[in-house]
Structures are given as structure tokens and as C-alpha cells.
Image: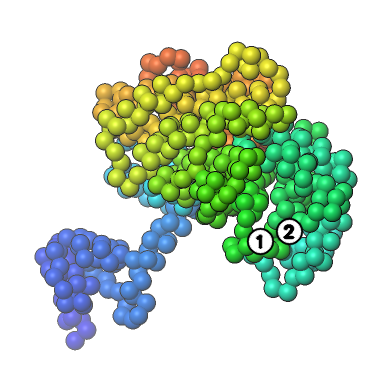
Amino acid sequence: MQDLLRPTASTKESKRLRGEIACAECRRLKIKCDRKVPCTTCMKRGCAALCPNSTIPPGDGSRFVLAATEHLRQKMAAMEARMHALEDALAIAQSSESSQPHPLLTVPFEDEVEDEPSLLQPMNSEETAQASNQFGMLHMDPVDYGSARFFGPSGGSEQPRPVLQELDPSYLPDEINQLCQGFPFTPPGMQTQVVIDMIETFLPPIERAIELTDTFLEHLSWMFHIVSRQLIVGELIPTIYKLNHNTYGPHDLALMLITLGIGALVDLNLPPYNLEAQHYYRLACAALGLQPVLSQQSVVTIKTLHLISIYNGMSGKESNLEQSYMMLSLAGRLALGVNVDPSSWGFQGREAYDRRVYFWNLLAAILWQALVTGRPPVILQTFIHCKMPTDEEEELYQLGEVPHGFGTWGFKASIECLLPAVRATLAAKPPPYSEILELDHKIRKFASVTSASEDQNDNTALSMRTFVRSHYQDLILLFLHRGFFAQAMAENTDNPLRTTYGESVTAAYQSACVVLEDTRVQFMKKPTLCARVWRIWSLAFSAAIVIGAVAIRRLDFQPPPLEQFEIACLLFQKAAETSSRAARALVSLVTLSLSLYSVVF
């Protein structure tokens, strides 16, 4: 009997393969089958691999096949990306030792030979796949909104990476370490004043606290206006160091400590990512956790979270970048009331000015984060009811202070240029391309305020502020156009200028060249400080990838793309000696350069 059935089964399988009868799974479910291989029903259910002759085992778990398949697909993609990154790193490391490839890279994987042809057949061309991979690093794909990485996972570098020492927290009391572990939540049973007293025993001498505050303001105030010298040195330090009889809360202590931590990060007399900075960071997290962040927040709480976000971004650890995003987003969510003009709450004079200035700085930070990561901002224009500080207020209240941020010019740039760019690039329904070009024209017309005297000033804060202002509009234009730049490259790999988005190709390339050149010049002026500011290298990397994408297609642009890309690689090679972010970016640039030279030569 079994012998008689075998031919019948074989015949049915053959008929299913030829599409003559319904597949086994559709027959099991008693549903209509379109008899394709694989059929539409099996593809929708995530079991295309079983079609046409196999079936899903019955049971409750079968409904989760699609989810499991997607999970495995994502895991395989991540593992594949990791393997490619490790292969690139191994090739780069081997190139410095020998002209011969590493033995591990010469032996093909046992399934590679027979699998590769079938996998490569559906692709349009190798160049299209290469462009797709490169633009993935530019965060074009909305699926990548869940990731704040700029370069993807990567291995080593030609340059030795900066050694990131991890602080051993065993010298701190258990209560402080417990608060750090639970940050930003408050563990139950903590005695607030007892822990504050513990933290105070680990404070630096008052002279060092003032020195670190001044270092923080001198080296980073050009980026933002979160705290002033008057607040930290004039109010918090005297109170915390018991020079007066004022009282303070845990979040006041946390604000001072995170200021010291970032000050230590940019203290050029200390090594990058030093242990002193990590020490103050842990103390700041512990102090912030002593008072519930979500239910007992104040402007001080929001400022502390904002600074913790900046610290994580500059800490040298790629794993901290997601926390950097989360902390700034949390600060924006908790800023309820800060978006309303302080005059509505009865604030006047210096206090009203400080609150207005901070709101507009917080808004700028959130908008830039949205533009760079591709994630929507947590503060929307509809809910902004805070006046901009005036030039007269700035002149009055900034007297004697280190130059902060971009001043009133920066606030106007945020509302007139940055906010529309974020709205256009992150909208669920993108605006017509004509509106993008109109916005481009508006951004270009926005007046720059860089003066000749500031440009020649050797003061660190003024020099860095001039550096950012000089290409601020070009940065916005780069992010405004890069999605259309990628689309044009994908539509016509030979000559993207002939596509609908040809103007974006030119605009993105020109802006990228300006960003890269300004970064190169400023790095020559302030190499040590520039190497420690991670955002500089994230933005420069985006510019370098755009230039590399143009160079690899041998497009006739001015300045010459190949020359510009070589400048980018040399710049990142120098910065990689002390910057972990530049070191990670260099791996991708070297990989791209190898592809570029194989095409050119």
C-alpha cells in the first residue's frame, strides 16, 4: 500500500511546484490559493519558505510565524553588517603590516560560492547596492529612526583608537552607586540629606570647581546657553560649599556637578574621556536621582538633563549616544511651562531673560537632534508661546559673561530656517519639491553675522562660535537636500543631475564642501578642542559621505570631488588620534575610498 501511495505523493508535489494545484498550506487552511510559487497567501503569512509542499505545524505558536521571521531577518542583517565591518577592519589592519591580504580573507565561506550568484541576480547593479549602503549611513531610511548611530557597527581603524578608561566606582558608597544604577529613577528608602552629605565629601576644592566651570564656559559656551557663570560661580558654588546660608536641593547639586564633569571633558590639560569627568558624572546622576525627576522637576532639572545628554554625547562611548538622545528628549518632555513666556508666570528682569534664553537654546538642540537622527522633535511650533530675547536684553544681561551660543541671531535662525527644515524633512507626507527649493532660497537669504573682527579673534569661545556660524546655513541645507540627493543618485547612477532632484545634488555637494573646509580650517586652529566635540565629527562625516558619493561617480563638480574626499580622509585620520567618533568614521571613509579608487583607477 505504501509503495502505491509514493508515486501519488510525488505527483502532487510536482503539480504544486508547477502551480497546477493549490499549495499544501492553503489546502490545510481550506482557503483559495493563487497557485503561484510561493503563493500570495503564504507570503502574507510569512511562510513563503514552506510553499508549496510544506505546512505550518498546527498550534497557538503558528500565528507568530511572521513576527518570528521578521525578527530573524533583522538579526541576520545585523550579523551580516557586523561581519562585513569586521572584514573591513581586518583588511585595514593587515594593510599596515603587509601588501598581501589576510589569510582569513582569502578563504571563501563554504556556502558563499554556490549561494552568491542566486542572491546577486535580483539586484539591479553592484553600484546601486553600493550607493544604497552608503546612503544608509546617512539615515535616509525611515526604518532607521530607532537608531541614533551615524556610521553603523564597525571594527578597527588605521589609527589607534583613544583608550577609554572606565571608572571603577567601588570607591564610592553603595548608596551613590545604587542611585547611579537606577538613574533617572529614585530608589525607595534613600535618605536624601545623608546621601547629599556623602556626595559633598567627594567634591573638588572650590578653586578646582571654579576652574572647571570657567573651562566649561570658555570651551563650550559657543554651542549653547544653558548655564551662566553667574548661576554656577555666583550662586550654586557659594551655596554648596557653605559660603553662605542659602539652602539648595539635590538637583541644584546635580547641575553643578554635571557642569564640572563636562568641564573636565574639555579640560585640555587632561586626557580625553578622563576619569575625573566620569567621577563628577556619577555624582551628578546620583544627586539627580535623589529627587523624583518625573514628578518634582524644575528648570534646574531640565537643564541638568540637557547637560547630561551633552556629556553622554561627548563621553567617547558609542553606546551612550542613545542615552544622549533619550536625556534630551526627556528634558524636552519635562519642559512643560518653559515653552510659555515667563511673563505669564510673573517673572521679570534677569530671571525672565534667562528662562527665555534657555527655552530657545533647548528648542535649537531638539531641532538639531531631530534633523540629524531623523526622529521627530518633542517640541512643536504650535505650542511655542515664549518670546525671543531682544538685542537690548542680551547686551544688558550678558555684560561680563563669556559669549554664549549664537545670541538673538541663533534664535531667529531656529525659527526661520531650522524649524521649517525639520518640518519639511521629517513630515509624514513630504512637501512638493518646489517648496523645498523655496525653503532653500529662504535659508540662503538669511543674513550671517560673522564679522571680520570675530573671525580674527583668538579667543576660544569667539573662534568656535564664528566657526559654527560660518557654515550654519550650509549644515541646514545639507540635511534639507540629502534625502533628494540620495533619491537622485538611486534614479540615475551615471548622471544624477539629469533627474528631477538634480538641484539637490548640486546643493548638497556644495554645502558638504563648505562644512568640510570650515571644519578643516578650525581643526588646524583648535585641534585638541575640536577633537573632543563629537557633533563636529558627526556633521563632518555626513558631509564626507556626500562628497564620496559624488566622487565615486566621477561627476564633474567644483571643487573636484576626488580632491575633496582625499582632504576629508586626511582630516579624519588626524582627528582619529584623539577622537573616538572620528576614529569610527575613519573606518567607513577608508572602506569608501577603497571602492572609489577601484572605480577611478
Crowd band around label 2 with a 10 angstrom C-alpha radius: few (<14), some (14–19), many (20+): many
The relative height of residue 557 versus residue 394 in the rendered view (above or below) is: above
Q: Position of residue 56 (x, y in %)?
A: 30, 74
- Visual colour scheme: rainbow
Residue at far left of view: 20
Which of the two residues, 517 or 78, is positioned nearer the viewer here?
A: 517
Residue 345 image position (x, y, % from top left):
55, 51
Q: Mark 1, residues whose alpha carbon is within 10 Å: few (<14), some, or many (≥20)?
A: some
**Above-or-below relation of 408 to 580:** above
Front of the two marks 1 and 2: 2
Marking on residue 183: 1
Can residue 89 be seen?
Answer: no
Q: Quadrant of residue 212?
A: top right
Taking 156 as reference, is 300 above or below it?
Answer: below
Q: Is residue 339 left or right of residue 441?
A: right
Report if residue 430 is visible in the image.
Answer: yes
Please tell me whether mark 1 sits on a helix, a strand or a loop. Answer: loop
Where is the C terminus found, in terms of image quarters?
top left
Residue shown at the point (80%, 46%) measured from the top left? 237
Q: Residue at x 47, y 50 (%)?
A: 378
Q: Which residue is mark 2?
A: 250
The residue nearer to you, when weighing 234 against 173, is 234
Identify which residue, 504 or 222, lies in the foreground: 222
- The alpha-carbon separation of the residues under discs 1 and 2 comes to 14 Å
As drawn, the residue found furthest toward the bottom would be 1
